């Protein structure tokens, strides 16, 4: 099904240099913010106290945050957990105060605002666990990236694998750069979103690359630039419909999913937007500049002996 019929090829590759300059500047800015500001790791990574509390009626989350702010807990994650009456509170580590003292202070403050509040569970997440999570997350990103390169190498040709991994890492670094710039909470759900974007972006690249390979076989008199422009134009309808519907679902999570899904959906939103951009305007120009040709994708014919010898 094709809702958007584009009859004339759009000359994307004519502006490839401009788009890639924009990408390089954006990428360098993201790296700069990552180096200078760093990620604001959540309790999942830095360690802290996790409390599960319950109210007799639906909990007023903003009011709970205000109560905790008055107690001196500014960087606290408060979210509904399970039902509207249950709340999960994540407190960062504080020097000189044990986890038990922290939870007791919090409960005393919350009971003054609402005497019906009950403590259901309290857990301490140590910094060592957080360090292991950071290391495991970095390893997961590394292994996924290697897997994508190998997959594209076997499916197409090494030039496509290199282009796809550069484009995908471009998306990941920009997501991380946004989180560093605005100091948004980087938690395990955000890491899951980053890994999901890696797979999502490579899917779009594979669609375009498949069409490029097909065009090299069908459009034998066309140049490489014309073939890539035609491949991107012919996949535009699918790109708009697929990413548009996905983005609508993610935006629903972003605006109506509450704090639990907020940063997860935010990372997905940034990743999807840059994933579309990089698959079309970063990966394809890189393939072109690496010198992809019809000979790279067509099987070579064996030379035959012409001297009559067996």
Image (cartoon, rainbow, N blue to C red):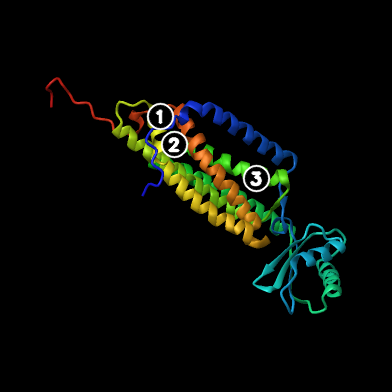
Check the picture and name the quadrant holding the C terminus. top left
- The one of 302 and 86 positioned closer to us in this rendering: 86
Q: CA distance from mark 3 to mark 1?
A: 31 Å
Task: Name the residue: 57% across, 48% down.
Answer: 141
Q: Position of residue 239 (x, y in %)?
A: 45, 45
Taking the image as shown, residue 294 lies to the left or right of residue 175, namely left
Res 182 visible: yes
- Left or right: where does residue 256 sit relative to residue 51? left
3 or 1: tag closer to the N-terminus: 3
Q: Is residue 190 above or below residue 106?
A: above
Asked if labels 1 and 3 touch by Cβ distance under 8 angstroms, the answer is no
Quarter of the image holding residue 296? top left
Mark 1 and mark 2 lie on one chain; the one further toward the N terminus is 2
Q: Nearer the viewer, residue 146 or 14?
A: 14
Please provide percent x and percent y for residue 204. Answer: 46, 44
**Which residue is at the far top?**
307
Q: Secondary structure at mark 3?
A: helix
Q: How many marks?
A: 3
State the residue position of label 1. Answer: 292
Residue on which disc 3 sits: 176
Q: Earlier in the sequence, mark 2 or mark 3?
A: 2
Are the residues at dot 1 and dot 2 in contact (C-beta closer than 8 Å)? Answer: yes
Q: Residues within 10 Å of mark 3 (few under 14, many from 20)?
A: many
**Are the residues flagged by discs 2 and 3 in contact, CB closer than 8 Å?**
no
The answer to whether 286 is drawn above or below residue 194 in the figure is: above
* Residue at image coords 53%, 26%: 17
Residue at screen point 51% across, 44% down: 146
Name the residue tied to disc 2.
160
Residue at 48%, 31% in the rendered image: 285
Where is residue 209, by image quadrant? top left
């Amino acid at each position: 099904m094709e809702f958007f019929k584009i009859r004339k090829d759009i000359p994307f590759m004519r502006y490839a240099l401009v788009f890639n300059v924009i990408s390089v500047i954006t990428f360098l800015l993201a790296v700069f913010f990552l180096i200078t500001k760093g990620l604001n790791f959540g309790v999942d990574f830095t360690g802290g106290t996790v409390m599960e509390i319950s109210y007799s009626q639906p909990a007023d989350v903003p009011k709970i945050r205000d109560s905790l702010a008055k107690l001196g807990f500014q960087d606290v994650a408060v979210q509904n957990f399970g039902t509207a009456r249950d709340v999960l509170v994540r407190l960062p580590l504080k020097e000189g105060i044990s986890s038990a003292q922290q939870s007791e202070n919090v409960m005393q403050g919350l009971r003054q605002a609402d005497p019906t509040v009950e403590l259901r569970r309290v857990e301490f997440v140590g910094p060592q666990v957080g360090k292991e999570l950071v290391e495991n997350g970095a390893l997961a990103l590394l292994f996924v990236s290697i897997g994508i390169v190998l997959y594209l190498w076997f499916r197409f040709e090494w030039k496509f694998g290199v282009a796809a991994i550069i484009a995908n890492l471009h998306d990941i670094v920009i997501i991380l750069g946004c989180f560093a710039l605005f100091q948004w909470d980087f938690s395990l759900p955000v890491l899951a979103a980053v890994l999901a974007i890696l797979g999502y972006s490579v899917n779009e690249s594979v669609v375009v690359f498949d069409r490029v390979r097909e065009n090299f076989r069908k459009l034998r008199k066309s140049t490489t630039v014309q073939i890539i422009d035609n491949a991107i134009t012919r996949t535009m309808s699918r790109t708009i419909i697929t990413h548009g519907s996905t983005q609508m679902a993610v935006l629903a999570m972003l605006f109506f999913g509450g704090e639990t899904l907020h940063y997860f959906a935010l990372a997905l939103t940034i990743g999807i937007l840059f994933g579309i951009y990089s698959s079309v305007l970063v990966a394809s120009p890189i393939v072109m500049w690496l010198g992809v040709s019809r000979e790279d994708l067509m099987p070579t014919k064996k030379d035959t002996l012409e001297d009559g010898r067996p």
